[in-house]
Amino acid sequence: MPLTILVAEDDLGTRLSIGDYLESCGYSVVCAENGREALALVETYQPHLIITDVTMPQMDGYEFVRRVRKRPAMRLLPVVFLTGRTDPQERVMGYQLGCDIYLAKPFELTELGAIARNLLDRVQMIESEWRSRLQAAEPVVRSETSNKYAPSLITLTSREKEVLILLSDGLSNGQIGGELHLSSRTIEKYVSSLLRKTDTNNRAELVRYAIEHQLVD
């Protein structure tokens, strides 16, 4: 499934431009015209990234992000602030609230797209590493008849399963990244995790192992 980006922007033209561009990049986009509306959408859509204007009616971007950050599950959610304000104090306030990037208006959509991709890749890599460390900390039981891990003990994340299926179809890291809207570097991390979990040495062994143990259809 595509990653979800929430865009909060009171200017209709800017909001539509950002939404259309990010959707063309393969993301799922939900939009709000003020912070109050955006706050409600956070609960509904659980976005992977927030892009918000600072100056908005009813609730500005600062207050919106302040309320989002009060929720434990949202404390690490990446945030991009968009603003025409250039006062350093404004930027300091934004960073103190936990924004990752402060992008001044006017800006290029291609730059915003690159920022979004970088932040999302970073978060996914952190999550993948965190899961791998948790799994590595668990006791490992090996099969008595093989030096490979017992298939029933292998636990794959939903993203690892997606990568493994596409890998079994013969796709390259770049092609898999295109299908899942991830960078090749992120796909390499998932492949490395799969190799480690299955105790295989290369992609060919990994695919053969997956087929033999019915990890893929």
Image: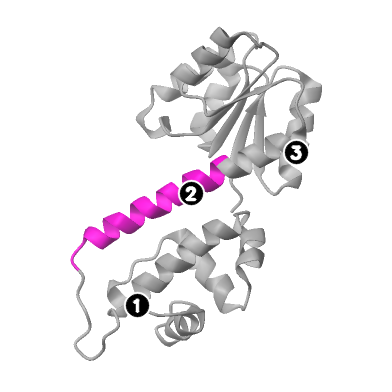
Under circle 1, the secondary element is loop
Q: Are marks 2 and 3 in contact (CB under 8 Å)?
A: no
For residue 197, side relative to residue 177 (left or right): left
Task: Inspect the magenta stretch and tell me whether residue 122 lies in it.
Answer: yes
Above or below: residue 119 compared with residue 68: below
Three-letter amino acid code of the residue under disc 3: Thr
Image mark for residue 110: 3
For residue 167, side relative to residue 16 (left or right): left
Disc 2: which residue: 124
Three-letter amino acid code of the residue under disc 2: Gln
Say whether disc 2 or disc 1 marks the residue closer to the N-terminus: 2
Image mark for residue 199: 1
Say whether disc 2 or disc 3 marks the residue closer to the N-terminus: 3
Above or below: residue 110 compared with residue 93: below
Query: What is the crowding at mark 3: few (fewer than 14 residues within 10 Å), some, or many (at least 20)?
Result: few
Three-letter amino acid code of the residue under disc 1: Asp
Residue lying farthest to the bottom in this orientation: 145
